Amino acid sequence: MPPAKKAKILKPDAYDTVKNAHASDGSYKRTESRFKPKVETLELDQSTPGRYHLHVALACPWADGALSVIFLKGLEDYVTHSVTHPTWQRTRPDLEGDVHTGWVYAKEGDKPLSSSAGHGSFDCDGCIPPGGEYQSIRDLYVGVGEMNGPFTTPVLFDKQENKIVSNESTVILRILNDKFNKAAKHPDLNLYPAELEQELQTLNDTVVYPCINNGVYRSGFAKTQGAYDTAVGELFDALDSMEDRLGNARFLGGDSFTWLDLRLFHTLVRFDPVYVVYFKCNKKRIQDYPNLLGFVRDVYSIEPVKRSINMKHIKTHYFTSHPSLNGHSIIPVGSGPDLDVPSGRGEPVKLA
Ligand SMILES: N[C@@H](CCC(=O)N[C@@H](CS)C(=O)NCC(=O)O)C(=O)O
């Protein structure tokens, strides 16, 4: 048998997509999503199972949050989903000069993939291809005429019309909560209680999104010391304030679990295993915040949320996808606190 071909080792920077989206002061600027329909006026089909499909990277907090809502609402038979390989790959490996790397599809049992710089070997466990001709998330965007990236997950896709319904997680969450209740097994579960709408939106817009959800990325992708110092300072101020808030209430809006808890959870559950090390968010760990740790355990105890968490995909993605941050794709040993223990914050969580 001929010897297995050795992967070619590339220069770390050559295949790295964490190169775009920075301001002149070195701070990270996330690109706005392009498909943000107004949910109130959106008309969606509620009687054709499988028409809508969610493309998910399980490592991605935004996409994984959307998958949690599919499970929470009992929509898995109506809105199908697929799961990418965790390690970013060149999406046009045969095209010389096209150095884009991003999410690609594989199926369980396929041969493991190396990082785009040629290091390591990462299996395809948990990958679910979407069927059809899509090899990557880029293919999906290109298929609807969107030639320029970023080619992000989540994407809610309408297979009948061959179009992207939305690629913005906040919009997709609201769609899944509001728009498929005839098909949902749990139509009464409402993650957007009207009486909390304004309060939660303000808390999101001023603290949770900019300083925490996006704050970890602003810290980790900063290209100057000043940009990093600002981002990490705002991040830990925000975590301190959430620690205080969750000392007085079980969830951000009080007794009931909402979309904003889900958004906060998906960042916190990745914090100790990934962001502390990878994004240099090491002033404190979630483990050092009793209320935040209890909150993460409470949310993780909600079975449909837990079902959406795949720690192997989470760790593999971050540590193997950006050669300029972790050239040899070594995955650190820690996986964060044990989440399978009672939070000590009262009765087991029950959803309304
Ligand atoms: N605003 C978007 C952000 C989505 C996003 O940035 N997803 C990342 C993964 S966590 C991605 O797919 N990045 C691919 C790339 O930048 O090439 C949302 O919340 O849906």
Image (cartoon, rainbow, N blue to C red):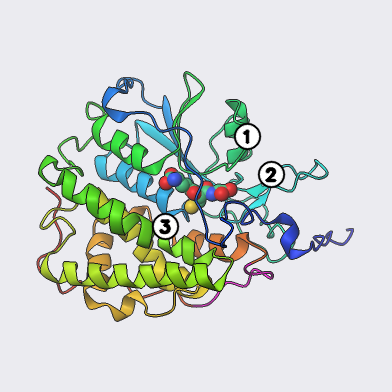
* Label 2: few (<14), some (14–19) or many (≥20) C-alpha neighbours in 10 Å: many
Q: Is residue 134 above or below residue 16?
A: above
Residue visible at 55% across and 40% down? 129
Asked if residue 90 shows in the view, the reply is yes
Query: Which SS class for mark 3?
Result: loop
Q: Residues within 10 Å of mark 1 (few under 14, many from 20)?
A: some
Of the residues under marks 1 and 3, which one precedes in the sequence?
1
Name the residue: 42% across, 71% down: 232
Whether residues under marks 3 and 2 lie with C-beta atoms below 8 angstroms apart, the answer is no
Q: Amino acid at mark 2?
A: Thr
Question: Does residue 79 appear left or right of residue 217 in this picture?
Answer: left
Indicate which disc, 1 or 2, sits on the residue closer to the N terminus: 2
Residue under the image location 42 percent in, 24 percent down: 51
**The stretch drawn in magenta includes residue 198:** no
Q: Position of residue 15 (x, y in %)?
A: 72, 55
Determine whether the beta carbon of the residue marked 2 sits less than 8 angstroms from the nearest atom of ligand 1.
no
Query: What is the crowding at mark 3: few (fewer than 14 residues within 10 Å), some, or many (at least 20)?
Result: some
- Relative to 16, is 76 on the left or the right? left
Image: magenta residue range: 325-333
- For the point 27% across and 29% down, the residue is 179
Q: Is residue 335 above or below residue 154?
A: below
Label 3 sits on residue: 214
Q: Amino acid at mark 1?
A: Asp
Residue under numbered circle 2: 91
